[in-house]
Image: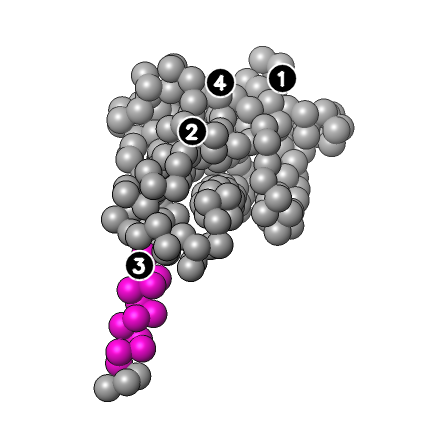
Amino acid sequence: MATERADQRREAGRRTRDGLLAAAQELLAQRGQEGVTLREITGHAGANVSAVSYHFGSLKALCDSAIEQALERYLDAQIDAVASLDATSGVEDLAAAFARPMMRALAAGGPDLAVMRTVARVGIDPPDGWGRLTPKFQQSRQDIVRALSASLPGVDEQELDFRIRCAAGLLNWLALAPIGTELAGKPSEQIERWLVPVLAGAFRGSPNVR
């Protein structure tokens, strides 16, 4: 019986922690770190203010954890999408894989889009916790450069890296700018039809490369 009660407490604690992270991500996506208060997050999550101290220590630590979790989910999804490509994949295929997490979020809206907006909003001012994700950043970059090099053998790695960062910046801007609302909620096929050629053009750098 004691073990069962302990398991129930752990599960309740996990749900509270996850709820705080989800609430923080949604509010951060709307207003950024400077516009979020402790009571707003706890109210949104249906939790006590003391729960933040118990699970995270401070509002800043909660926000950093929420941002880090959002970024890790984004990187994992992007790495998996790029890994699904094969030797026959071209620039358009890579652009679709690169943008897949964002396109899915735009189509789904709600929490998924909140995660993408959180990642985009803090991209220019990374929190300290992002250091833990350095290996995933490096893997994502290496995988994309490798795939792009196969289609663009005459372009050196430095230039490819620049094009990739430009494409990533375009996705971040799309998540936050008013133009992104034109895509939000539309069918995923339409989002892909509109967006992928734009990203492929950024990757390609020349209309003559297929």
Residue in front for this viewpoint, 53 or 73: 53
- Residue at numbered disc 1: 205
Magenta region, residue range = 4-16
Q: Quadrant of residue 203?
A: top right
**Spatial separation of the CA atoms under disc 4 and disc 1:** 11 Å
Dot 1 surroundings within 10 Å: few (below 14), some, or many (20 or more)? some
Residue depth check, mark 2 versus mark 4: number of the one nearer the observer: 2
Q: Nearer the viewer, residue 192 or 108?
A: 108
Rendered-image quadrant of the N terminus? bottom left
Discs 2/3, front: 2
Q: Which mark is first along the chain, 2 or 1?
A: 2
Asked if one can make out residue 121 in the rendered structure from this viewpoint, the answer is yes
Q: Which residue is mark 4?
A: 198
Q: Which residue is under mark 2?
A: 35
The percent position of residue 172, horizontal first and vertical second, equals: 49, 26
Q: Secondary structure at mark 1?
A: loop
Q: Which residue is mark 3?
A: 15
